[in-house]
């Protein structure tokens, strides 16, 4: 009994030349995807939606601050927690999470690390025995001062070219947006 020969589907060699794009079902060649504009242009600029522009600006500011904080050894969330504890000493972990705009789980990890490093300390709440209050230590104040110097550079870049009155208007508007939409 003989074996049947194997069938192969050999293709004819392709001619050298530019690669062809496949045709769509309509018979036309698909367009190449347009490249999005850089920040500040098109819908990523003055023609963009406010919510998107706020998000874009926040992402750029966050990345700049993350990079600026590298020499301090702090992460952006740690910096926010220290900043809020300086502004509002004695916050509980839950309150700290709210004002730092972080999840309670994230704040618990941050608090644990900052306490381990000696930057913050806990004291029991005078009324609620199970609730802990957090405050900065001398080490925490020094660390925050070092980080604040780096953050100030970013703040100056953000305010560059703005008059005091314009900056006050922007701050007022941003605070209004946060307060108004927070209740929505």
Image: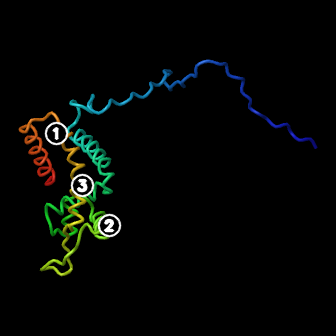
Instruction: Reply above or below: 37 against 71.
Output: above
Furthest toward the bottom, the residue is 129
Which residue is tagged 2?
A: 113
Q: Position of residue 136 (x, y in %)?
A: 20, 66
Which residue is tagged 3?
A: 146
Residue depicted at 15% across the width and 53% down the height? 182
Q: Nearer the viewer, residue 19 or 28?
A: 19
Q: Secondary structure at mark 3?
A: helix
Q: Nearer the viewer, residue 14 or 70?
A: 70
Could you say which quadrant of the image residue 107 lies in?
bottom left
Among the two numbered marks 1 and 3 on one chain, the one whose residue lies closer to the N terminus: 3
Could you say which quadrant of the image residue 35 lies in?
top left
Residue depicted at 18% across the width and 72% down the height? 133
Instruction: Reply above or below: 79 against 15.
Output: below
Which residue is tagged 1?
A: 159
Among the two numbered marks 3 and 2 on one chain, the one whose residue lies closer to the N terminus: 2
Mark 2: give few (<14), some (14-19) or many (20+) Cα within 10 Å: some
Instruction: Reply above or below: 86 against 134.
Output: above
Q: Secondary structure at mark 1?
A: helix
Q: Quadrant of the N terminus?
A: top right
């Amino acid at each position: 009994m003989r074996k049947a020969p194997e069938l192969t589907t050999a293709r004819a060699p392709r001619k050298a030349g530019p690669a062809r794009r496949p045709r769509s079902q309509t018979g036309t060649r698909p367009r190449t995807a347009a490249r999005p504009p850089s920040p500040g242009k098109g819908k990523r600029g003055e023609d963009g939606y406010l919510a998107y522009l706020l998000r874009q600006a926040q992402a750029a500011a966050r990345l700049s601050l993350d990079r600026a904080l590298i020499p301090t050894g702090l992460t952006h969330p740690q910096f926010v927690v220290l900043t809020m504890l300086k502004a509002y000493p004695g916050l509980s972990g839950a309150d700290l999470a709210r004002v730092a705009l972080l999840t309670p789980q994230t704040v618990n990890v941050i608090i644990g690390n900052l306490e381990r490093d000696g930057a913050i300390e806990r004291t029991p709440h005078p009324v609620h025995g199970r609730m802990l209050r957090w405050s900065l230590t001398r080490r925490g104040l020094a660390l925050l001062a070092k980080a604040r110097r780096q953050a100030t550079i970013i703040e100056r870049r953000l305010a560059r070219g703005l008059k005091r009155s314009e900056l006050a208007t922007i701050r007022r508007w941003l605070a209004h947006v946060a307060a108004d939409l927070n209740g929505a």
